Amino acid sequence: MREQVNSVLRQLRMQARSVEQEAALGALRYVAHDGERCLLEVKPLLAPLAKEQLLPRIQALLSELVGRPVRVHIRAARSPQQELFPFLPTPEPEEGEGAVGASDPYTFEHFVVGPSNQFAHAAALAVARNPGRHYNPLFLYGAAGLGKTHLLRAIAHAVREQHPTLEVRYLTADTFMAEVVYAIRRDRLQHFKTRFHRIDVLLVDDVQLLAGRERTQEELFHIFNTLHETGKQIALAADRPPNELLQLDERLRNRFGWGLVVDVQPPDLETRIAILQRKSHLEGVDLPYDAAVILAENAGPSVRELHGLLTRLLAFASLSGTEITTALAQKVVASSAKGVDRPVTIERIQEVVASFFGLRVQDLRSPRRSRAIATARQIAMYLCRQDLGASFPYIGQCFGGRDHTTVIHAVTAIERRQAVDPELRKVIQSLRGMARSGEGSEPSPWKTSSA
């Protein structure tokens, strides 16, 4: 398994979307596996980023490589923080540090509560204290990076601590999908159902990704019914409320709304500052208040963006061997250029890719199959999947109503080409930057007049 893990990490490192992702992928280390589960370890500072941004992709690629579902777990290494910040003193280990989950960042204690998420936090806490008795199901929705995943995993962590006899399972919709496909292919569907029916607390993240997966939705529908009828707790998260998940089965949408539906809003400035201070404190770093204000004022609404800016600031300080100051914070903000970012959408990706290749957006959506158009279309589909997390069926719909298998083929083809084509990797990185910054594309050596 070690060789397969290293192969996946190498592949993803070549596709890294940021310096932080590349650093995390380079720092991840294989620890152990037991057939169904694989444990990886990474430096404490990089653990949240690895879990939030890299874990689903690592899990999917590793499962594909070994030919069976593998549940990947990433834990923070219990090594001194000097590995990343040599100028910091070694912290004394806290009592109980070696306990299971002691270094888990996804707990209620590590969640910063503010006006934007107070209701969602209270509901999640109530569910964790009395599973199956209140708000069943609990449905959290909101844009990416606002804390939905944190709350779901905090529920799982708290239930395991407070109700150790209960069977708890947190997973993403992609993982659930992969397990359904595996069970069908191996004729183990009954075993799959039995495993899920034994669960006492089921938490499913990113359920919007089930769009267009009729068989997977059917299995979730039956599992939902069985668990709900027997008083088991269900909690879900998505990027929109149940009634707007129009590509999901109506029966599922109705059931998702049976309990409590809670909107998670972007944090206000005070909450963003508190998040930065809490995060830096957990890392054993003294973040000046004025520096926190600069980061908070210039980051986007996503908590992940906040964490990304903080990670970059700490890395700058470490590499230069200097203290964290307001001047350094301003330098990090300027280099990140977050202030001019614009929201990335499928339409924006189509515009940027079409312009880069000297095409029209209509060409990407048309039935035309010239080599230039096909290449541009595949790259655009790849970016929509990797950067936005859009479902295969929905991407196909946005590209002229193509079948989801066409999108899967496009994503796979670009992933394989990137592994051996550094020029393509540079092109994709450039396109990502253009899509985020709102800039037009520069003249491309790939540009064609065949449109």
Image: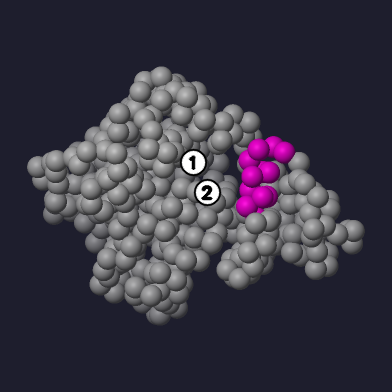
Residue 161: percent from the left, percent from the top?
Answer: 16, 46
Residue displayed at 26% across by 45% down: 81
Position of 369 compared to 296: left or right? right
Magenta-tinted stretch: 428-439
Residue lying farthest bottom?
186
Kindly state the secondary structure of the residue where label 2 is placed: loop
Residue 163 left/right relative to 293: left
Query: Considering depth in this image, is 375 or 16 the residue closer to the camera?
Result: 16
Q: Mark 1 points at which residue?
A: 144
In the rendered image, residue 428, in percent from the top left (x then y), is placed at: 65, 55
Q: Name the residue under label 2.
A: 18
| First reached walking from the N terminus: tag 1 or tag 2 | 2
Q: Outermost residue toward the front?
A: 321
Residue drawn 26% across and 38% down?
A: 88
Q: Where is residue 442 in the image (x, y as percent from the top left)?
A: 77, 47
**The one of 421 and 52 positioned closer to us in this rendering:** 421
Tag 1's secondary structure? loop
Instruction: Confirm or deny contact between disc 1 and disc 2 (CB under 8 A).
Output: no
Residue 416 lies in quadrant: bottom right
Q: In which quarter of the image is the N terminus?
A: bottom left
Query: Which amino acid lies under the numbered mark 1 shown in the image of this protein?
Result: Ala
